Amino acid sequence: MNTTNINNKSLAYEARGSAEPVLLMHCGFVADAFAPLMNDAEITSRYRLINYHRLGYGQSDRASGPMSVAEQAADARALLRHLGIERAHVVGHSYGGVIALQLALDAPDAVQSLALLEPSIPAALADPAVAQLFMEAAGKAFAQFGAGDKAGAVDTWLSGAFGPGYREIADRALPDWFEQAARDADVVFQVEAPNIQQWTFTPAEAARITQPVLSAYRPEPNWPGFQKTHDLLQAWMPQIETAFLPIERHLLQIMNPRAVAEALAGFFARHPMRVYA
């Protein structure tokens, strides 16, 4: 990866492909979650994919203190400008989808289209069943983190998000990823988890987003939060398009990059850019 100074901090990034730019925002814990998509020759032959490690992850600087979702979105915008890109398709997976939504609100001219891969919006927790499942997993994970067991905290959290046996599946695509996730645990538990509790996304804010939006999801019997989020986005955004992914877990592009690439490429093709950097 390359590194560059963005807002007085070093961010690691890579770009692959050509033509219309696509900014990828990874999920929590897994800095290289988009690496399998970056290796998909078909989509990189049609689009310029830009993948980066958010602050606190992977090869980027550690997070030195509190950092809002808006600040994370500002980092993404600054990275695009560093690359000479004024407008891009934006893709966010899970917590990355939260940042993508914030970027669309704060810098609408920078977002050509918005592809959301099962984002985590707090409004979904208004459902008691969703809230109970989340609090059970999160409470145990925070207790483990507080006791110094970072690997255990990561495993507890991701067992809930990705399902049993997730490590074996992810290991096939991303060797050594779990060790990196444990090293990056601080940013999740000390920065991003508190952020999501403070961040709001309401119908009024959703109405401000006028770009084309894709909600890509799959049914999840063990964690109804993703379905609830998808339902809310459909209700709040009349322009939303849906892509049903034939993938069993929230691992998405880690598990089946070809299916995700096909959904994204089809969406981008329906909403092409007239001019791109």
Image: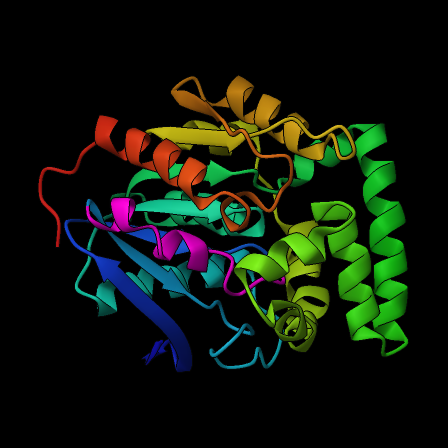
**The N terminus, quarter of image:** bottom left
User: Residue, x 31% and y 59% (percent of image)?
Assistant: 50
Q: Residue at x 49, y 81 (%)?
A: 61
Does residue 217 show up magenta in the picture?
Answer: no
Q: Is residue 71 above or below residue 40?
A: below
Residues drawn in magenta: 29-45
In the rendered view, would you say 224 is above or below 64? above
Render colour scheme: rainbow
Residue at the left extreme, as displayed: 275
Asked if residue 70 lies left or right of residue 248, the reply is left
Q: In screen coordinates, is 144 left or right of 157? A: right
Q: Quadrant of residue 82?
A: bottom left
Position of the C terminus, as image quadrant, is bottom left
Return the x and y of residue 202 as percentages of the image width and height.
57, 32
Residue at 40% in and 49% down: 103
Q: Nearer the viewer, residue 93 or 162?
A: 162
Residue 149 is situated, as x and y percent measured from the top left of the image, at: 85, 75
